[in-house]
Image (cartoon, rainbow, N blue to C red):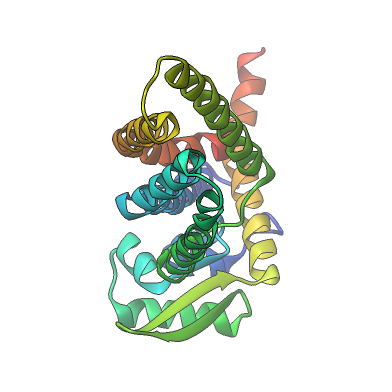
Amino acid sequence: MTSHDAQVAQVALDDVRRRRGQSHAEYVRYGLSRPYLAAAALLVFAAFASFDLPNPWGGAVLLPGLVLFAGTSAVYARRASVRMPLTSKQALLALAFGLALVAAFRLLSGAAEAGGVPAPHAVVSAVLCLAGAVVTDRWRAVAVARAQDKKAEATAH
Amino acid sequence: MDEDFNEFLHVPARLAIVALLAPASWTEFGFVRDAIDTSDSALSKQVSALTSKGYVEVRKYKTLGGRRALMRLTPVGREEFRRHAAALERIAAAAHAPQAAGQSD
């Protein structure tokens, strides 16, 4: 093998890493796009705000929520350009995020209720969902760039 | 040359396509075309070659907006790509080994 072979191999490897990063970046970009952020925020808001509704109306939110979730998932599955299997790391991160969100909701809604805020669960969930959507929207460009660079670094080592 | 080196896959256009498909379960034809900046016909030609080798699987379906095509690596294609990438790593690493031995003297 010559040094020319090694150079050719290195160029090919660099392109492989760049392409893998492109796929990952598109996956992250599409998954965090505004329509899906809005649907997720609406779902979370409906689920948390329903705590303010008297029985049995709190449970009535369940069916529309499931329909919205199913519809959003179906649209995503049909339109995503890059589809990737969910890894166990991603599932654990999502679980951790969900638990943190529930903890924040309980803490804040308890404080809001104690403070005499009307419809405390709806108010707190609106604040959490809006804040989460804005932060994620701003973070999307960063996340896409990291997906592109992180994959290139990971395959380099 | 390394025994895992795959001349068929090493063609730049094919290697780029396979590298784009590798991390995904299914990838859309249009995304691959735009990512490697080529035409529908040129990409179709390369995809046909990869399909005939058994490396890529294509699935077409109708949507409201027209027809779409999804592609993915087959288990054979995934394994061949993995072996070829490993061969490239070894070839690239071999360039540094003689230099390291020389520097230690």
Q: Is residue A51 visible?
A: yes
A130 or B14: nearer the eye?
A130
**Quadrant in which residue B44 is drawn:** bottom left
Q: Residue at x 65, y 63 (%)?
A: B78
Quadrant of the image containing the C terminus of chain B: top right
Q: Position of residue B28 (x, y in %)?
A: 43, 70
Compared to A15, does A129 lie above or below? above
Q: Position of residue A116 (x, y in %)?
A: 39, 19
Q: Residue at x 63, y 38 (%)?
A: A95
Total numbered circles: 0
Q: Position of residue A154 (x, y in %)?
A: 56, 36
Give the left or right position of residue B78, taking residue A150 as reference.
right
B90 or B77: nearer the eye?
B77
Quadrant of the image containing the N terminus of chain B: bottom right
Give the left or right position of residue A123, taking residue B103 as reference.
left
Give the left or right position of residue A127, taking residue B11 as reference.
left
Compared to B49, does A73 lie above or below? above
Q: Position of residue A74 (x, y in %)?
A: 48, 69
Give the left or right position of residue B59, taking residue B100 as reference.
left
